Amino acid sequence: MHYNIEEKDLGRINTLKLLTCIPTIFLIFGLGYGFFGQGWSDLYNGFINIIFSPTILITDFIKVGGMGATLINVALVGFLNIYIINYYELKINGVLIAAFFTVIGFSFFGKNIYNILPIYLGGYLYTKYQKISFKEIVVVVMFGTALAPFVSEVSFLGILPQIVAIGMALVFGIFIGFTVVPLSSHMLRFHNGYNIYNIGFTAGIIGTFLTSLLRSFGLKVEPVNIVSKENQIVIIALLIVIFTGLLIVGLIINNKSLIQLKRVFEFSGTLVTDFPHLVGYGITYVNMSLLGFSGLAYVLLIGGVVNGPAIAGIMTLVGFGALGKHHKNSLPIVVGVILTALFFGYELSSTGVVLAVLFSTTLAPIAGTYGPLIGIVAGIFHMILVTNVGIIHGGINLYNNGFAGGLVAGILLPIIEAFKKEE
């Protein structure tokens, strides 16, 4: 280790402050939209639309409720998680940072303050049943909100009386929170940590079961495509401010030096590669910032729209810059996805392909372990699968790329190992 105790302690304290700043910024600008832009009535109605939306893939809250209401939702979800982090005095490590940024990102599409609560309750009840502390599993439950759309879908199908539907949604949400923890540890064995979005794979399995259950009763659960098609300069500016803040704080903690960034590139990224523990908070912030700028620049350069889903992809990329991802192990995967998209004639600027590119980095450990060529192959496999597996769970698993990534890793790794043994 090349960082000292003072740097480590300073980073731990400042990370919580940084995390708190993010929903605070979004809240201020969300309220600003009510005061200067949308008007309070439109802001309120937009927020209600977000809460009562089914939210399955892909439901962009910017399109559903407007920018101001979306930012309010993001802030509320963020503050809820900050409260939990503070109340349980959680250790601010790479896993927690990744979970927080992921939840924040998906609050722009899919997760709202209503549909995540039953899942947290289910996780809490699980700890009571197992007689363990909620702090031991809260990060898994944060990731487990990948299935939050199922709560909304059951709540607002419009077939059952509203109170009955909400009651059923509460039961299903509790079931998700209760089961995601034990299942996630078993699913990890399938891909041996080479799919960083392990909960995405777990959620895909649970989601497939739940969607099949609804379909057995004749209920239609299919992915949708409700997305904003215009860039919002305010959100782009906010993302730049956040990434710049991470960069500046990281450089200050790291004595204005980037020399340790090369240490980050030495790690393959397999679960769990906790960069704050391994290289310190300072250089971790820098790595997160650079990934964020790269993700944002990519979307803009290809003519894509920085809408809710794209923001989720960028923020998740940033968060996992604290847990295994860096440019060296991520770029080969991205190249494989882009080449495949071009080969099949997909439009690179379309939201679906943008998501595939950003989230495909879940397979970064494969490139980090086996080299860039195998990484490109993994990206090719990922693009082929991710465009087809969403129909299985009907879009209720927000981490569709994590589901596809788990399948790719589980299939590709045994093949790689088999050829290695024949050498």
Image: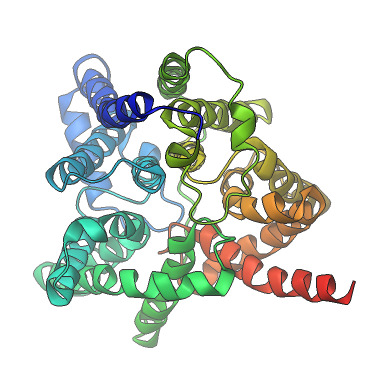
Horizontal relation, residue 367 to residue 326: left or right: right
Give the residue drawn at x 36%, y 77%. 210
Counting from the top left corner in percent of width and height, residue 343 is at 83, 52
Give the residue drawn at x 58%, y 19%. 258
Give the residue drawn at x 43%, y 62%. 199
When asked about the image quadrant of residue 44, the answer is top left
Q: Nearer the viewer, residue 307 or 372?
A: 372
Q: Nearer the viewer, residue 115 or 155?
A: 115
Q: Is residue 119 in sight in this rendering?
A: yes
Q: Nearer the viewer, residue 267 or 33?
A: 267
Horizontal relation, residue 361 to residue 211: left or right: right
Give the residue drawn at x 44%, y 76%. 186
Q: Is residue 74 above or below residue 24?
A: below
Q: Is residue 115 in sight in this rendering?
A: no
When asked about the image quadrant of residue 174, the answer is bottom left
When asked about the image quadrant of residue 141, the answer is bottom left
Task: Specify the color scheme.
Answer: rainbow
State the quadrant of the C terminus.
Answer: bottom right
Q: Residue furthest right?
A: 423
Counting from the top left corner in percent of width and height, residue 188 is at 49, 69
Q: Is residue 257 above or below residue 321?
A: above
Q: Residue furthest left?
A: 163
Counting from the top left corner in percent of width and height, residue 150 is at 32, 66
Counting from the top left corner in percent of width and height, residue 345 is at 79, 50
Q: Is residue 303 above or below residue 368?
A: above
